[in-house]
Amino acid sequence: MRFSSRLDWALPRNPLTQMLEAKRAAGEPILDLTESNPTHAGIEYPEREIAAAFDNPRILRYEPDPAGSLAVRKLISDYYNGAAAPHRILLTASTSEAYSYLFKLLCDPGDEIVVPRPSYPLLEYLARLESINVRHYPLFYDHGWHLDPHALETAITDRTRALVLVNPNNPTGHFLKRAEWESLAAICERRGIAIVSDEVFADYAFEDDAERIGFVAGESPVPAFSLSGLSKIVGLPQMKLGWIVLGGPERDQRAAWNKLELIADTYLSVGTPVQVAAQRLLALRHDIQRRIRERLLTNLHRLRSAPDIELLRCEGGWYATLRVPRTKDWAESLLRERNVLVQPGFFYDFESDAFLILSLLTDPATFREGVSRLLDL
Ligand SMILES: Cc1ncc(COP(=O)(O)O)c(C=O)c1O
């Protein structure tokens, strides 16, 4: 049997993973500061209300619609305070699936997308599955994260079809600012490139900033697609409901919509139960977000109050980045000598190993103890 080359991934097991497996097999207790699954993080959910949202005989009827139920699309339009029209919102089973639809829409095999570095590691794999190539544009750190429009432009080639933004970025927590937005929108307009903006963490800003652009499709002069879903905004990744909001010139939106509907019609992947439950689930987001935010801020405060930690400025999201001296491999040493698991920067394509990523979703007692052991190393 022959397999597609799009799955020819070199996936060497790195020393950290090997050490973790060995320690777990030996029964050693590990303090895990990488938990990014909110349903595994000890956050209390309004369980009865969530279960009640599915207690509805409408889940028994199948009424397929490639774009998803109009009633749900209206709810999502409300989530954007009307800045996104329901007929420009297309439902998907997840944000990851939304990416795959957009890469199919915009790229032929061998085409390119430009993605930020550092950023969300899954982008590379999502691109490979569509047989497209990834080029990177750097985010740089100088009293906060910034996007360098000149470096972005040099990453673009004749085969580039889309610029991916992760806004706020995972893991840096960088939000796109107005000045950055204006330069990158001008570049995309000049080069004829669409924008794909992953806004799954947009509701988790740690402070207000009038310079921030939260919803790219809402104000884009070029074809743009904003992505989000219940995974982060209601902290319920298992529900499998995401969406794409179309933005940019009306004519482009219409053309893109017709093609996206074709893609969605081919799979019809969004389940009926979650669409029936969506109204009640979305209504729970304020309560669930408050609980998640409380957790994030407790852990962030722990880092901010530690005198010997260089915490990079983090404007939002679920992660914190620490800069550590280049004296050793900190993630490996922490696991080997202190049984603490953190992610090394290279997992997210940081330029070097001198960064550690901690999940702010971690249970606070585990986080506190893990940080004490880190300070002690
Ligand atoms: C930046 C970012 N985008 C998308 C996703 C995936 O979201 P979904 O569960 O909707 O596929 C994640 C999950 O961690 C993420 O961090």
Image (cartoon, rainbow, N blue to C red):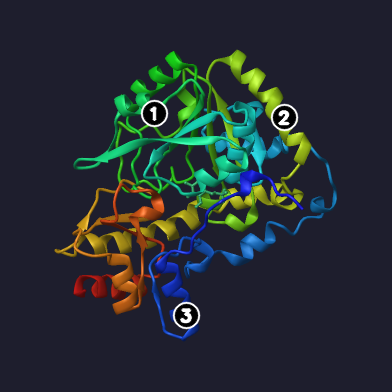
Q: Are marks 3 and 1 in contact (CB under 8 Å)?
A: no
Circle 1: element type: helix
Residue 102 coordinates in the image, percent (x, y): 60, 33
Disc number for residue 24? 3
The local secondary structure at tag 3 comes to: helix
Image point (65%, 48%), residue name: 278
Looking at numbered disc 3 in the image, what kind of residue is underneath it?
A: Arg
| Picture layout, residue 298 above or below residue 281 | below
How busy is the neighbourhood of tag 3: few (under 14 within 10 Å), some, or many (20 plus)? few
Q: Residue furthest front?
A: 1
Decide if residue 219 is on the left or right side of residue 265.
left
Name the residue that disc number 1 marks: 155
Helix, strand or loop status at disc 2: helix
Q: Amino acid at mark 1?
A: Ala
Of marks 2 and 3, the one in the foreground: 3
* Residue type at tag 2: Glu
**C-alpha separation, residue under disc 2 versus residue under disc 3:** 46 Å
User: Pointer 2: residues within 10 angstroms few (<14), some, or many (20+)?
Assistant: some
What residue would you read off at disc 2?
A: 261
Pick the front one: 112 or 12: 12
Q: Residue furthest left?
A: 307
Contact check, label 2 and label 3, Cβ < 8 Å: no
Image position, residue 255 (x, y; %)? 66, 18
Pointer 3 residue Cβ closer than 8 Å to ligand 1: no
Of mark 2 and mark 1, the one earlier in the sequence is 1
Expressed as whole percent of the image width and height from the top left, the position of residue 94 reads 61, 46
Residue in the image at 51% along x and 48% along y: 122
